[in-house]
Amino acid sequence: MDAFVWNESFCTHIDSVDAQHRQLVELVNRVGEMLVDTAGVAEEKIQAIFGQLAEYARFHFSDEERVMSEAGLDPHFIALHASHHRSFAEQLGAMWQARVGMKNPAEALHGFLATWLTFHILGEDQSMARQIGRLRAGSTAAEAYAQESAVADAPTSALLEAMQNLYGVLALQNRDLAEANRSLEEKVAVRTRELLQSEKMASIGQLAAGVAHEINNPIGFINSNFGTLAHYVEQLLRLAEEGRSTSAGQRLADDVGLDFLRTDVHDLLRESQQGLERVRKIVANLKDFSHVDETQWQEADLLAGLESTLNVVWHELKDKVEIVRELQPLPCVRCIPAQINQVFMNLLLNAAQAIAGRGTITLRSGQDGARVWIEIADNGAGMDETTRQRLFEPFFTTKPVGKGMGLGLSVTWEIISKHAGTIEVASQPGRGSAFRVWLPVTGPAAQEVAR
């Protein structure tokens, strides 16, 4: 059975408005049918109703405001009427966002719509229709609006005012519920990203430790054998030199180019030794960067961590940037080293990606009282103020689709906030950007660490 039956009380005798009001009454009754559904209401049905209500509001409110404007109603009445339209749309959106946390969203929606039908369609829209009638009879817009106060009888006015007040209370409750739901969702999202980041860094650390261990063993063999190889080569060269004392030996030495071989073999051995040293250094930096066993708060050398991180990402930078160091010594800082290295990595890679051709990344550091700072600056594309304001929003990115998810700087912000630090960003389009990370030397307070 329908809770609302269309009758003359709803009619404004404006064809387009009445047709749309009929549609709303039908939607309200459909929501009412959901209340008696003992099997429960499927989410798909709720979503469909919200979608139809949103489309109704978009079309009907625009059309109704057009009718009032073309009729020439008093501007004050039109403004008040339009503000109630906007309020309905806002509350509908708030209920949509909060529906997951509601025990019975259909019941809440039905009460909201019933209140709206009563005070708006039976009240304001009837007033609109009467004023249009007076204008057609020769009254001015101001006169037609002023006469409304004398039309309704006292009981009806009191009822409509009470319904309007009830609608206002429901609107506030919906807004508060939506805000609480949004806040909770944000907290869950932040915590989820933190957990994913922690798991990712732990996996990277374990992988780095495993790779370092596997590489260190053969490097040890090669280094050990390399010294012996160099000694053997020296002995062979001495033997070959002795063989030149005979004419046959001299001819053989000339044929194989012994003088060139002597020089070149030493160069090859030296370059190979340098390559091995480079591999050893990369492995050491990878271990330092990952800090697989350092997930607790501790005193750490930030500049050493910066250098380790720089070496780990050097393959991404070497072909396009020159590194300029303007670093001042810093005291050790209480932090979680692996997380701070993650911050350095994100900022270094962002700086490199901001440079189109070849450019410069400048590393700076300093101390101001109980805080230290490290700055990573580039001479790349820079950014406008609108982009700068959104930098740390999750999933915000200026990169092409498929080139990044927009989480790097969001994670960076969360890590620095966790360390009771701040990030300052200075940038101008075409002149590059500078990210300065500030951290307290003693780390965050105990209560902040516990959060």
Image (tube, rainbow, N blue to C red):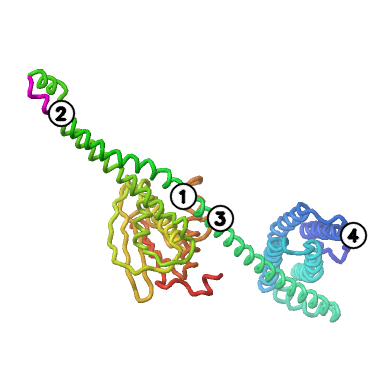
Predominant SS of the magenta segment: helix
What amino acid type is highlighted by mark number 3? Leu
Closer to the camera, 7 or 320? 320
- In the picture, the quarter occupied by the N terminus is bottom right
Q: CA distance from mark 4 to mark 3?
A: 50 Å
The quarter of the displayed image where residue 144 is located? bottom right
Q: CA distance from mark 2 to mark 4?
A: 110 Å
Left or right, residue 172 beside residue 158: left
Mark 1 closeness class: few <14, some 14–19, many ≥20 residues within 10 Å: few
Q: Position of residue 375 (x, y in %)?
A: 35, 63
Q: What is the span of residues highlighted in magenta in the rendered image?
A: 238-246
Residue 62 lies in the magenta stretch: no
What amino acid type is highlighted by mark number 4? Asp
Farthest residue toward the right?
Answer: 1
Q: Secondary structure at mark 4?
A: loop
Residue that numbered label 3 is attached to: 196
What amino acid type is highlighted by mark number 2? Leu
Mark 2 closeness class: few <14, some 14–19, many ≥20 residues within 10 Å: few
Q: Secondary structure at mark 3?
A: helix
Q: CA distance from mark 2 to mark 1?
A: 63 Å
Residue 242 lies in the magenta stretch: yes
Residue that numbered label 2 is attached to: 239
The answer to whether one can see residue 71 in this image is: no
- In the picture, the quarter occupied by the C terminus is bottom right
Q: Secondary structure at mark 1?
A: loop
Q: CA distance from mark 3 to mark 2?
A: 63 Å
**Residue depth check, mark 3 versus mark 2: number of the one nearer the observer:** 2
Residue that numbered label 1 is attached to: 399
For marks 4 and 3, the one nearer the N-term is 4
**Residue depth check, mark 4 versus mark 1: number of the one nearer the observer:** 1
Left or right, residue 89 beside residue 281: right
Asked whether the beta carbons under mark 4 and mark 1 sit within 8 Å of each other, the answer is no
